[in-house]
Image (spheres, helix red, strand yellow):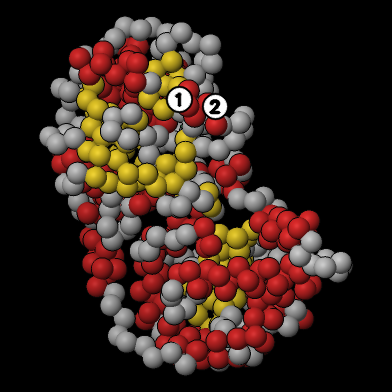
Amino acid sequence: MQKLDPYLNIDPGTMSPFQHGEVFVLDDGMETDLDLGHYERFIDESLTKFSSVTTGQIYSDVLKKERRGDFLGKTIQIVPHITEQIKAMVQKAAKVSKAEVLICEIGGTVGDIEGQPFLEAIRQLKQTLGEENVFSVHVTLLPFLKASQELKTKPTQASIRELRRLGIQPDMIIARADYEIDQELLEKIALFCDIEKEAVVPSPTLDSIYKVPLNFHELGVERTIAKKLKLKLSEANLDDWIELVGKINQVNRTIKVGLAGKYTDLNDAYMSVVEALKSAGYHHDVKVEIEWVDAERLEEGDLSQLKEISGIVVPGGFGERGIEGKVIAAQYARENNLPYLGLCLGMQIATIEFARNVLKIKNANSSEFAPATKYPVIYIMPEQEKIRKKGGTMRLGAYPCKLKKGTLTYKAYKTDEISERHRHRYEFNNRYKDRMEKAGLIVAGDYLDGKVVEIVENKNHPWFVGVQFHPEFQSRPTKPHPLFRDFVEACLKGSTLV
Ligand code: GLN
């Protein structure tokens, strides 16, 4: 799968999750749009940087070639130079993935100025690859008008007209709506848009996104596509999905898990964390309800939110806001045997809390939040400081980590070495390691033979785990991540179910 994003950023790494949702990280360290997370969860494959292309990257590559003199004095233009580069990236992704079919999503809306070079490139690809090797799916929205109680097809008709003007006749329309779409409407779309009836696919909002593949299968979507692409289909094996959806339909108990992030009530900003929690829940036949814990409220001394939850997750984050509240949440979890899962920043918070309240180093902090602190229990390693220019690179992508036997983490993964994705600058400061271990902190995982602490746990606590990486990026709905799975199990043990 591949996403073509028409914005000018080279990647979404520097965009605010508030605006753009979570930044999803791949094994190779590419920072991508949250859609890549959906792709990995739906197809259960780990993708590469070739799956994430933006206008920024395309221009940057073309301009680099221009400076190198690759174009031999020609005038560089959107057509053909930008479109050629887009086509090359599409074909590269197809080749690298070794897949039989590449699903390539163009972000934005038909008619956007930025999207046009991508649509033109796709139009040309049909020329190059031949009619039977390209299948265009147009996703449209059928808005619901409350006053007349009906779904409208006019926007679909208008965008099809625009697509045709650009030289693309879609082979399939997926009609999104928040309500059931009746047959008559689908026929109307087929007629106006000149598409076979079976290729107009109703896609009403379902109560779980994981029901969508089964819905498409029932409607014969893959058969319609295979017919045009002249592909031989074997019987789809949807057993895992059927089992998952069965579980989703069956759950009738709920637990509340606290999520102490910077952005509250913002699913998109923590998409993979929320999905990993939900999947772990389905595994245990329980619905995980997310309680957004407001760190700033904790700072004001109001701990009521913590008393209503069965466990707490402190997710990744950057910047100072809400940090003190998160430290309070970690302290509350440690002292009250509340299951705690710290993800990246959440591991750093757990370390700061331990230093302050167990080792009694009152001013312990991360040099990210207190650059002048005398007690940087989290800091930038000196050797990294040298290589990294300001605003420069982070530790990104998959790194190996050795696990210590007898720990909660080892029990979860059941293996000596794991590989997890990273996205951070600061690290655990080994200067404090011995003292912390003596006081009950467990280093459950490390990288480079102990040089880099990756996982901390807590003696005398039923389930307290902080990891320097982002396990949520590798959780899949049909294969919940072991840490999330065991965290939810621990939450269940201590909770009164509703
Ligand atoms: N801000 C922290 C760091 O840069 C944690 C990053 C994160 O949680 N992804 O190390």
Query: Would residue 312 be found to the left or right of residue 167 on screen?
Result: left
Mark toward the start of the polypeptide (2 vs 1): 1
Q: What element carries label 2?
A: helix
Q: Nearer the viewer, residue 171 or 117?
A: 117
Q: Does 254 appear above or below 319?
A: below
Name which residue lies at 51% across and 91% down. Answer: 228
The disc placed on residue 381 is 1
Is residue 398 in view from this perspective? yes
Quadrant in the rendering for residue 261: top left
Q: Residue 301: where, in percent of width, then height? A: 41, 15
Query: Would residue 210 be found to the left or right of residue 320 on screen?
Result: left
Quadrant in the rendering for residue 54: bottom right
- In the picture, which quadrant includes the C terminus? top left
Name which residue lies at 61% across and 43% down. Answer: 15
The disc placed on residue 245 is none
Q: What element carries label 1?
A: loop
Q: Does 375 appear above or below 100?
A: above
Query: Would residue 325 be found to the left or right of residue 404 on screen?
Result: right
Q: Nearer the viewer, residue 453 or 495?
A: 453
Mark 2 is surrounded, within 10 Å at the Cα level, by few (under 14), some (14 to 19) or many (20 or more) other residues, namely: few
